[in-house]
């Protein structure tokens, strides 16, 4: 393409973005498109919830242009503010915006089903992953997460922190999380980001392109919040009868009370199934090791726990019940809050607050890039070198994350066996 052609197209794109919302010229996707996209992500998204955010952004913001970076960051801020599995809530909301309720459930099913099936089968394959080879594979997948998250942080920082004010907010958020190191600090920082954005980002104006279009109204959202509260209060009252109600209560409570998702839910699950005597500590830790090695959401660990529950509660039925119970509260809260967010997010002060939240989100991801991603992935200089090559494969050569998975795992195996 000649430079003049490029400049003309860029100018046309710029003028169009002023007069109409970004991506408004793109047709809404089908449920099938959402399902296929998230099935591919569910089969290849290694590295835990933080890495999943990087995979989502690469695929849906950069490649398929489902939404803008600002919209993506708004959804991420909402999902981080609410309890539940942040990456799965992101997938649910992305599917909802793309293809309505059918898209939301398609995204959840496609992203979660592979890891659920693998967790149920992993017990039979666990001996093959207990030696040096299995440890090297798991370590290679951690390095994949390092490259993917680094790419995501770099891309979002370019888009959402274009000035010194927002870059400074992001750096302060990163430093605060690394010093304090708690999920509660993240929630406080999101609130501070709103206030700081209103106060400091005075040049920010509302952008139609940044609006979140949610295909559900406030009344339905209120119903979802009421169902969440009724189950949260009612299940503990009924769980004394034991059986499936006790299983539902344990997993629902874990999904409803955990902030940060991923590994943060493990102590609550341990309290639900090990303290009660349903599962031995050894079996619990074996499933935890499996969850780290597989793609998809960490909450799929519930499928393993449900399948090994005592007779009458476990098996395939127990696995499905545990999975639905642990994911349900996060989705009810998300469906309840999204329409409320849509109502308040288009004013001038809201636009400034969103800019502040976006900057804080970049800072939170930057903190996660260091701990736990970098800390767990880099144990020697060779690990860092492998991760840098994987990062260059994504950023410079624009290769698929599958190539990065192959490279990092192969390099880790080679070092372990050399």
Image (tube, rainbow, N blue to C red):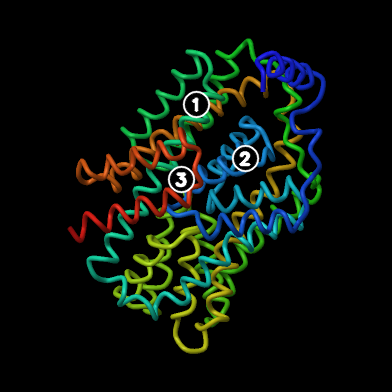
Label 2: how many residues lie within 10 Å, few (<14), some (14-19) or many (20+)?
few
In terms of secondary structure, where does tag 3 sit?
Answer: helix
Foreground tag (3 vs 2): 2
First reached walking from the N terminus: tag 2 or tag 1: 2
**Residue beneath label 3, please?**
50
In terms of secondary structure, where does tag 1 sit?
Answer: helix
Q: Nearer the viewer, residue 128 or 334?
A: 128
Foreground tag (2 vs 1): 2
First reached walking from the N terminus: tag 1 or tag 3: 3
In this rendering, the answer to whether 156 lies above or below 303 is above
Q: Which percent across, then down, holds residue 3?
A: 65, 15
Q: Quadrant of the N terminus?
A: top right
Q: Which percent across, then down, holds residue 258?
A: 48, 53
**Residue beneath label 2, please?**
63
- Going 46% across and 45% down the picture, which residue do you hit? 50
In this rendering, the answer to whether 56 lies above or below 265 is above
Q: CA distance from mark 3 to mark 2?
A: 19 Å
Q: Quarter of the image holding residue 114?
A: bottom right
In this picture, residue 131 sits left or right of residue 276? left
Q: Quarter of the image holding residue 366?
A: top left
Which mark is on residue 157?
A: 1
In terms of secondary structure, where does tag 2 sit?
Answer: helix
First reached walking from the N terminus: tag 3 or tag 2: 3
- Going 76% across and 42% down the picture, which residue do you hit? 214
Q: Residue furthest front?
A: 2
Label 3: how many residues lie within 10 Å, few (<14), some (14-19) or many (20+)?
many
- Going 48% across and 48% down the picture, which residue do you hit? 401
């Amino acid at each position: 393409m000649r430079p003049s052609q490029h400049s003309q197209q860029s100018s046309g794109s710029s003028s169009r973005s002023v007069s109409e919302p970004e991506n408004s010229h793109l047709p809404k996707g089908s449920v099938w498109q959402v399902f296929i996209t998230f099935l591919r992500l569910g089969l290849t998204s290694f590295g835990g919830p933080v890495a999943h955010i990087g995979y989502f952004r690469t695929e849906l913001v950069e490649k398929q242009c489902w939404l803008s970076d600002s919209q993506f960051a708004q959804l991420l801020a909402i999902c981080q503010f609410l309890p539940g599995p942040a990456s799965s809530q992101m997938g649910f909301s992305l599917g909802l915006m793309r293809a309505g309720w059918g898209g939301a459930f398609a995204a959840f099913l496609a992203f979660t089903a592979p890891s659920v099936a693998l967790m149920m089968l992993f017990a039979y394959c666990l001996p093959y992953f207990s030696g040096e080879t299995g440890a090297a594979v798991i370590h290679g997948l951690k390095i994949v997460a390092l490259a993917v998250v680094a790419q995501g942080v770099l891309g979002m920082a370019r888009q959402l922190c274009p000035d010194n004010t927002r870059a400074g907010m992001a750096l302060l958020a990163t430093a605060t999380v690394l010093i304090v190191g708690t999920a509660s600090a993240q929630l406080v920082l999101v609130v501070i980001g709103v206030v700081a954005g209103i106060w400091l980002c005075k040049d920010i104006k509302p952008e139609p392109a940044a609006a979140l279009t949610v295909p559900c109204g406030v009344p339905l959202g209120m119903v979802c919040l009421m169902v969440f509260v009724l189950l949260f209060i009612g299940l503990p009252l009924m769980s004394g009868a034991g059986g499936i109600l006790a299983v539902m209560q344990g997993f629902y409570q874990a999904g409803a009370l955990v902030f940060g998702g991923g590994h943060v839910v493990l102590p609550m699950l341990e309290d639900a199934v090990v303290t009660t005597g349903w599962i031995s500590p050894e079996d619990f830790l074996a499933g935890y090791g499996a969850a780290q090695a597989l793609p998809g959401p960490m909450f799929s660990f519930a499928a393993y726990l449900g399948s090994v529950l005592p007779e009458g509660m476990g098996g395939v039925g127990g696995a499905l019940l545990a999975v639905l119970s642990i994911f349900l509260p996060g989705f009810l809260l998300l469906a309840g809050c999204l329409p409320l967010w849509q109502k308040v997010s288009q004013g001038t002060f809201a636009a400034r607050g969103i800019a502040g939240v976006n900057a804080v989100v970049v800072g939170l991801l930057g903190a996660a890039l260091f701990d736990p991603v970098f800390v767990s992935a880099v144990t020697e200089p060779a690990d860092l070198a492998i991760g840098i090559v994987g990062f260059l494969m994504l950023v410079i050569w624009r290769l698929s994350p599958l190539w990065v998975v192959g490279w990092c795992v192969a390099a880790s195996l080679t070092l372990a066996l050399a």
